[in-house]
Amino acid sequence: MEGEKLKAMDAEQLREYGHQMVDFVADYYKTIENFPVLSQVQPGYLRELVPDSPPVHPESLQDVLNDIKSKIFQGVTHWQSPAYFAYFPSNSSIAGFLGEMLSAGVNIVGFSWVTCPAATELEVIVLDWLAKLLKLPDAFLSTGKGGGVIQGTASEAVLVALVAARDRMLKKVGKDSLGKLVVYTADQTHASVQKGCQIAGIYPENIRILKTDSSSEYALSPEVLSEAVSHDVASGLIPLFLCATIGTTSSTAVDPLLALGKIAKSNGIWFHIDGAYAGSACICPEFRHYLDGVEEADSFCMNAHKWLLTNFDCSALWVRDRSALIESLSTYPEYLRNKASEANTVVDYKDWQIPLGRRFRSLKLWMVLRLYGQEGLQSYIRNHIALAKRFEELVRQDLRFEVITPRKFALLCFRLLHPAKDENQCDKLNRELLEAVNSTGKMFISHTVLSGKYVLRLAVGAPLTEERHIDVAWEVLQEKATALLKPYKNGIQIYSNGSV
């Protein structure tokens, strides 16, 4: 069939080309360690390598695959590499890949039940499954007033929750009160909340970014929240929305959900919990306590695409009262009317999200839950946490480094100490260390700033990561640290163990 004109769709051509693509992807994973983890290209590199207009005549799949190897892959940062330790993971898996392939194959647009009953009903069921794995309150199940929906990202999840909270409050206090609505977050909360406020029309001066510090391991203090709320109420403002986090981006801090939730409830505040990263860990009984207090929440989200072997994108959002979402986001033009929707006996997920169209994303989550099972997923999470613990032990053994915050999950925040204890120079030293290790191509880590200190972050979470990759990463860090510290040596014992 090679050389035959490619049809728009043909079962046998799909079989042939599909086999080639699966082989190509499998070979990519087999050789992924041969690539620099962080792409080393310069901005604009690709424009020099590809034509400035599309081909007039069809090209062969082999030519395209050759270009991917020679031109595209050099500009890819390899998130699935076992030496990828930056930001947070974005998991791929065999089950997730197969589900994504099937979703692309049937290629439905399931905005309402009638457009694909299976897509809607499977999503309802599979999010109930996941809610039960997380031991969420029954109020978040579809059998009650709440339920779950798959959003693209946690940013979308917090936005739709915020819009629902806004409209519910304005219905009560009047539309002219928009300028009085106040949103509360911590300085460790993901920036998506601030972007959501910009989109939802919350006045910038009414966004309270509450300060955290090392004394609470960067968790939001209930006392700080209570004081801010009381001050706003006394000023004639209207507390609207609180976002707490399980596993903040910078350091995986965990906010005290129960105490924060009680403050929110007593003040009529919508309480949203962002568990984008660490929510996955809560399927393990030993980490479920971090979710204590979720019973006070109005909404909760976690990203199955981060650490639960589900290919991007798959952010699960649960709400206590689905009518709040629907009333805020529903549109019902004539061209979408149908008997099932008008009978009010079905879920139309178009009314739970920002866009109209939606993919069959529940397929991949369903396949992940079935092909790995609860035990397999728990084992996967525990393995990464054990690897992060190993890395923490290695760092603590070298007195040139310090651990900045206690490790809770599979992220470690640490830094290289400056020999003369100069904080400004220490930041510069760690910037240089970050650049040095990432430019090797052998690993990729990222950074944050905590209490004004420039800090390195190593997050374990790639599906292929093994103990040997942790050991190599540590060797690279030690080697580059030794090189950076050479100018300070001059015979003086700088560290308590004499090392430099």
Image (tube, helix red, strand yellow):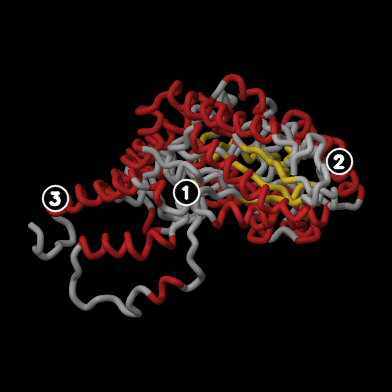
> Can see residue 432?
yes
Graded by Cα atoms within 10 Å as few (under 14), some (14 to 19) or many (20 or more), the crowding at tag 1 reads: many
Residue highlighted by disc 3: 11
Residue highlighted by disc 1: 79
The picture quadrant where one finds residue 277 is top right
Q: Position of residue 298 (x, y in %)?
A: 65, 37
Three-letter amino acid code at the position of disc 1:
Trp
Q: Position of residue 101 (x, y in %)?
A: 30, 45
Three-letter amino acid code at the position of disc 2:
Val
Residues 43 and 61: in front is: 43
The answer to the question of whether label 1 and label 2 lie on touching residues, with beta carbons closer than 8 A, is no
SS label for mark 3? helix
Residues 19 and 327: in front is: 19
Residue highlighted by disc 2: 224
Q: Residue at x 67, y 48 (%)?
A: 481
Q: Earlier in the sequence, mark 1 or mark 2?
A: 1
Q: Position of residue 96 (x, y in %)?
A: 37, 39
In the picture, which quadrant includes the N terminus? bottom left
Residues 201 and 213: in front is: 213
SS label for mark 1? loop
Q: Residue at x 91, y 52 (%)?
A: 235
Q: Earlier in the sequence, mark 3 or mark 1?
A: 3
**C-alpha distance separating marks 3 and 2:** 62 Å
Residue farthest toward the front in the current orientation of the protein? 491
In the picture, which quadrant includes the C terminus? top right
Q: Which is closer to the viewer, label 3 or label 1? A: 1
Residues 238 and 84: in front is: 84
Q: Which is closer to the viewer, label 1 or label 2? A: 1
> Can see residue 299?
no
Rendered view: 284 above or below 240: above
